[in-house]
Image: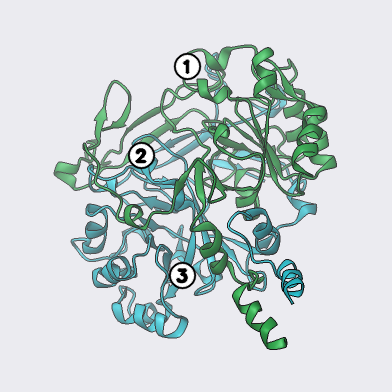
Chain colours: A cyan, B green
Amino acid sequence: MLKRLCLLGLLVTPVGAQDLWKAYGQLFQKARYVDLSHTLEPQSTVWRGFGPQQFGPALDPANGQPYQYEKDGFEATRYQLSTDQLGSQLDPPAHWNPNYPAIDEIPASYALRPLVCISIVEQVRKDPAYSLTVADVLAWEKRYGPIPEGCVVMVRSDWSKRWGEPGLAAEPKFPGVSLPALKLLHEGRHILFHGHEPLDTDCSPDLAGEAWLLRNGYTQAEGVAHLDQIPPKGALLLTGFPKFRGGLGGYARFVAVCPSDWKYGVRVDPKADSPLPRQSRPLRWDEAKGYRTR
Amino acid sequence: MLKRLCLLGLLVTPVGAQDLWKAYGQLFQKARYVDLSHTLEPQSTVWRGFGPQQFGPALDPANGQPYQYEKDGFEATRYQLSTDQLGSQLDPPAHWNPNYPAIDEIPASYALRPLVCISIVEQVRKDPAYSLTVADVLAWEKRYGPIPEGCVVMVRSDWSKRWGEPGLAAEPKFPGVSLPALKLLHEGRHILFHGHEPLDTDCSPDLAGEAWLLRNGYTQAEGVAHLDQIPPKGALLLTGFPKFRGGLGGYARFVAVCPSDWKYGVRVDPKADSPLPRQSRPLRWDEAKGYRTR
């Protein structure tokens, strides 16, 4: 019996505390990866209180000329960014309160967390300024189970589908997250942070939710995309951002790791991942758009 | 017997193809997270062929004045970056060849991979221009087993411990990775990409390794830090970078997920992760350094 149990143990060995590679083979190699970040362009939707962004080819300081494939064998890019509150990003609390961590002071353990997605798409269809309520959170839990401690909760509104529309950032009404819902998520469920698609937490005049979060040491994700492509529960979130010293916003990459039978997302593909496939047309600098295109 | 087996099955249930949350609870909640990226500063080590970087407080375009906590309730940061080949970064092949993907064209499945670390610290102590050889790769495999397909291989040299030293980027000798070793890793072992601590792949006059990689559609990580704090095998690598349209370098965040009994790295800490702890001193703009400090 003992021998049989041991054999069974080998066959159905649980992923042990040390076996991250085994977990990769069993789960992550077959998972589907959904990108939740917008692509950054000079025209990206940004709060009207910040200036414009400019991209350009990197210059040789010796002569001020751009590096070019033909003459130099490589190119690179220079950026003038008016703000670190740009694109899909992570707000460190120091954005509003200098006594709390800046972007480079956020722990590395933020990089991987369970991911919950609560949809308010139906509610927003009736009221474009709808904010996630306590009742919405409780209804999600009734259907899917308790929101796990330490997870990230994304609030899906589909507002991000209009990303890039001229004037979008100046519209007075957009979907949000109410302060009571934020307090339930943080003080009742002890989540790591929440995220939303618009550039602010809600459209109240005093930004009550954002003020409470950032003044009290909490982070939040803003400008998140493609929340229509992730499951309500069961996925993981990968969060990465460059670590600018004393920075107050994170140009962040959010990627959802979804179960292998999920309907969206790219798969690991040994044939196409490395080397990456040759593209149909070469990149070239597009003066009108202000970035490289094919 | 069947009942016992079923019961045992419940007790030692393997992480199923769909149970990413269970894997988080069993493995990632207890793991240790090691940050492999340098913090970006205006003084960060950069190739001398690129210009300087400048950080500044974000300005109100209405009056050109910086936003300030006292009068505006928040601050943000503006950046003038002379290159996207800055700090810890990921080279997309389009950095050298416009027919291959730019940084925004890299698949989301790059975000999570098994991590191998091969040390050449001893060899570099004798020869500061030492490059990883085929024999080094084979010696690693003899000791630790086959390098898994699709993984990331970081080459530890400890060069990064000198990061920020004036003149470092202009030194003609630095540790590298030889072209035969790269060919073995890619064509023989089918890794996803390799990474190294210096700013270039090797210090040969024709940059043979980098040229072969990027001209053929491979990516590579550069300027990687803290490789002395990860195990030779058994960890996972998280890779995140902002997705600049047509960009040719990635300001990347690399985080190693290490086993729970590893000696380095931060742990998930529900008491300190959210809200983040109040700091001993407030952030303020340091004119001499050109960034915010405490």
For the N terminus of chain B, which image quadrant? bottom right
Badge 3 and badge 2 in a common chain: yes
Instruction: From the top left corner, tell me how far across and down residue B76 is, in percent.
Output: 30, 42
Which chain contains the residue that carries disc 3?
A: A
Looking at the image, which is closer to me, B20 or A267?
A: B20
> What residue would you read off at disc 2?
A247
Q: Quadrant of residue A184?
A: bottom left
> What residue would you read off at disc 3?
A116
Q: What secondary structure is found at the residue carrying circle 2? A: loop
**Amino acid, disc 3:** Val
> What residue would you read off at disc 1?
B165
**Amino acid, disc 2:** Gly
Q: Is residue B64 visible?
A: yes
CA gap, disc 3 to disc 2?
27 Å
Q: What secondary structure is found at the residue carrying circle 3? A: strand
Instruction: From the top left corner, tell me how far across and down residue A220 is, in percent.
Output: 36, 57
Which chain contains the residue that carries disc 2?
A: A
For image coordinates 76% across by 70% down, the residue present is: A7
Q: Is residue A110 above or below residue A263?
A: above
Residue B48, which numbered label? Answer: none
Which of the two discs, 3 and 2, labels the residue nearer the N terminus?
A: 3
**Amino acid, disc 1:** Glu
CA gap, disc 1 to disc 2?
22 Å
Q: Is residue A99 above or below residue A261?
A: above
Instruction: From the top left corner, tell me how far across and down residue A90 is, in percent.
Output: 40, 52
Label 2 environment density (alpha carbons within 10 Å; few <14, some 14–19, many ≥20): many
Nearest to viewer (mark 3 / mark 2): 3
Q: What secondary structure is found at the residue carrying circle 1? A: loop
CA gap, disc 1 to disc 3?
44 Å
Please state if B214 lies on the left or on the right of B286 as rendered. Answer: right
Please state if A69 lies on the left or on the right of A139 as rendered. Answer: right
